[in-house]
Image: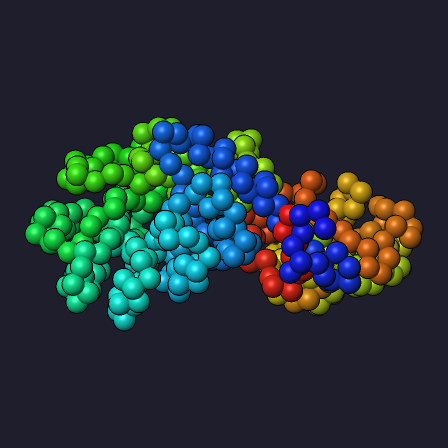
């Protein structure tokens, strides 16, 4: 079936409300591109939130086949689900660290927590003592984002604990860039300076610093391991610049009804859109329950044959109405498909129209679409 697995053969039959195609070859090419950008450092893969909504069960093994051996998730439950999908030499890191009660399972499955506080350090040190063996960990430091990581005033305390504690093997130290998608932001240089201060205090450990945008800020941000996320999946890593990544996702939505209405007809909930003349409309089978934000109402669009077809009226839970007057009569009928993501409309385009970011669009794509992995 030309690259489509038997698990997804139903998508080739038709009849779905929407078709979400994930191009695993493009994903692999993006990983290769990012690996080359950070060389001689290595590139990890951030596969949290089910690989940004695209299916970690497909994405992670494909990236492993490309040579990726470091995988980051946000929550411990994600690490447990990922562990059976990868060979033993793949390392899985939990960015949020561990909540109390997860220590023994984390140690048993060989998962590496990211330590974000003195409390988490003591928690993991206790787990090492209980297990009677040395356990790995990553140390994360807050360099200016005020979200996760050991704050500057506690660095020396942690340094003393690291020196005294023989039960934890620190894999590397890390931090997270808050504004790397804006190459002109002064916060990038500020965080780099803070990271260099961390490196001076913890000189015995390697650094892991750059996210997707950070990769394109240059070598000083790379460390020995970069952590791309959105760039792997085709999202633009830096705002205002040409996107160097290949698109990974396309989304086509099926038409469920067409009609012609006359001037004065109201469209959708609360009748927010009123047509001014004879208008041909189509209703498509996806809405905000499928990750298409309500804020696209009256702002977003789909495409057919390269023609922009605006969304009219409010986005509903399960459907959207579009104005199809610009395409020939009969071009769109029951079961026809229109493009929501594809050659004519990127993640960034949809995010802009919705007043949000590409991350939210990507991770919000629902589970009612038929998925095709190529």
The percent position of residue 32, horizontal first and vertical second, equals 49, 35
Tell me: residue 9, above or below residue 163. Answer: below
Residue visible at 25% across and 38% down? 206
Q: Position of residue 280 (x, y in %)?
A: 86, 55
**Residue 28 placement, left or right of 108:** right
Say if residue 18 shows up in the picture: no
The residue positioned farthest toward the right in the image shown: 329
Q: Please name the residue shown 26% across and 66% down the image.
A: 103
| Residue found at the far front of this picture | 88
Seen in the image, is 35 located left or right of residue 252? Answer: left
Q: Is residue 323 visible?
A: yes
Would residue 179 be found to the left or right of residue 1 on screen?
A: left
Q: How many marks?
A: 0
Q: Nearer the viewer, residue 306 or 186?
A: 306
Residue 285 x, y percent position in the rendering: 73, 62
Residue 333 spot, x, y in % from top left: 86, 57
Vertical comparison of 238 with 266: above or below: above
Please identify the quarter of the rendering in which residue 105 is found: bottom left
Tell me what residue is drawn at x 12 percent, y 53 percent: 166
Residue 197 lies left or right of residue 66; in this view the side is: left
Q: Residue at x 58, y 37 (%)?
A: 246
């Amino acid at each position: 079936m030309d690259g489509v697995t038997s698990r997804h053969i139903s998508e080739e039959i038709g009849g779905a409300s929407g078709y979400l195609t994930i191009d695993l070859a493009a994903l692999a090419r993006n990983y290769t591109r990012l690996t080359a950008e950070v060389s001689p450092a290595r590139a990890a893969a951030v596969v949290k939130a089910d690989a940004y909504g695209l299916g970690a069960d497909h994405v992670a093994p494909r990236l492993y086949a490309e040579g990726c051996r470091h995988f980051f998730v946000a929550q411990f439950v994600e690490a447990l689900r990922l562990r059976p999908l990868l060979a033993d030499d793949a390392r899985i890191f939990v960015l949020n660290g561990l909540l109390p009660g997860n220590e023994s399972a984390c140690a048993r499955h060989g998962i590496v927590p990211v330590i974000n506080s003195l409390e988490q350090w003591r928690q993991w040190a206790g787990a090492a003592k209980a297990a009677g063996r040395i356990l790995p960990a990553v140390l994360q430091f807050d360099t200016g984002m005020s979200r996760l990581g050991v704050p500057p005033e506690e660095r020396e305390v942690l340094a003393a604990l690291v020196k005294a504690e023989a039960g934890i093997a620190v894999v590397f130290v890390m931090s997270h860039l808050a504004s790397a998608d804006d190459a002109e932001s002064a916060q990038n240089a500020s965080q780099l300076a803070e990271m260099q201060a961390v490196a001076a205090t913890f000189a015995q450990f390697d650094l892991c610093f750059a996210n997707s945008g950070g990769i394109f800020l240059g070598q000083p941000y790379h460390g020995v391991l970069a952590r791309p996320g959105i760039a792997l999946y085709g999202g633009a890593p830096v705002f205002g610049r040409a996107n160097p990544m290949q698109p990974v996702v396309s989304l086509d939505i099926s038409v469920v009804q067409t009609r012609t209405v006359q001037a004065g007809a109201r469209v959708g909930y609360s009748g927010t859109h009123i047509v001014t003349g004879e208008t041909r409309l189509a209703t498509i089978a996806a809405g905000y329950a499928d990750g298409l934000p309500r804020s696209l109402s009256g702002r977003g669009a789909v495409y057919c044959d390269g023609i922009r077809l605006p969304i009219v009226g409010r986005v509903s839970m399960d459907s959207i109405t579009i104005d199809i007057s610009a395409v020939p009569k009969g071009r769109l009928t029951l079961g026809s498909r229109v493009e929501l993501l594809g050659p004519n409309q990127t993640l960034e385009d949809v995010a802009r129209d919705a007043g949000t970011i590409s991350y939210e669009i990507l991770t919000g794509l629902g589970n009612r679409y038929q998925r095709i992995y190529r």
